[in-house]
Image (cartoon, rainbow, N blue to C red):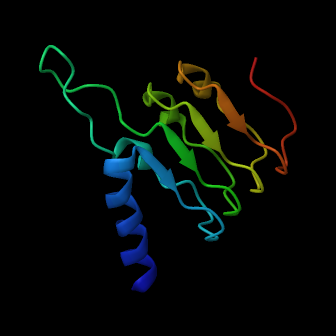
Amino acid sequence: TNATLEFCQHLLNARTRHEFIYSDRELGSYPIDVELLVDRPPNENGDQGAYGAIKVDLSKNKIRRIPENIGANDSMEVLNLSSNLIASIDAAIGMCSRLTDLDLSRNELSGLPS
């Protein structure tokens, strides 16, 4: 479908820009591993480096939960999940060690992980 093609195009663009911007699309769920699909450039040792998505914007998508594997992205600095339907956050979000800008405004949060 056109929606699938558009989503794939956004993923391809994310590979070079290191950001995935896909807001106001009524996804309904967090695309599992979306931040993991971005290129992992080699580090100075020649090993596969950190995940490349530095900025992820999935605002206004009716997302209800954040997957536990979100913590696997150790390069993400910005995560915008505003204006969704998220009621709780998994503690794995704390594993995103470089995350400095987390927007969860206009959700249905009842608490934060301890």
The residue lying furthest to the front in this view is 17
* Image spot of residue 82 (x, y percent): 74, 50
Give the mark count: 0
Q: Is residue 25 above or below residue 76?
A: below
Residue at figure coordinates x 43%, y 29% from the top left: 72
The residue lying furthest to the bottom in this view is 1
Q: Quadrant of residue 22?
A: bottom right
Residue 59 placement, left or right of 36: right
Residue at figure coordinates x 35%, y 67% from the top left: 8
Residue at figure coordinates x 69%, y 54% from the top left: 64
Q: Please state, as top left, top right, bottom left or bottom right, where the C terminus lies in the image.
A: top right
* Image spot of residue 66 (x, y percent): 61, 43
Q: Is residue 3 above or below residue 71?
A: below
* Image spot of residue 45 (x, y percent): 14, 14
* Image spot of residue 21 (x, y percent): 53, 56
Q: Is residue 70 above or below residue 48?
A: below
Q: Quadrant of residue 59?
A: bottom right
Between 14 and 87, the one nearer to me in the picture: 14
Between 80 and 110, the one nearer to me in the picture: 80
Q: Is residue 103 above or below residue 4?
A: above
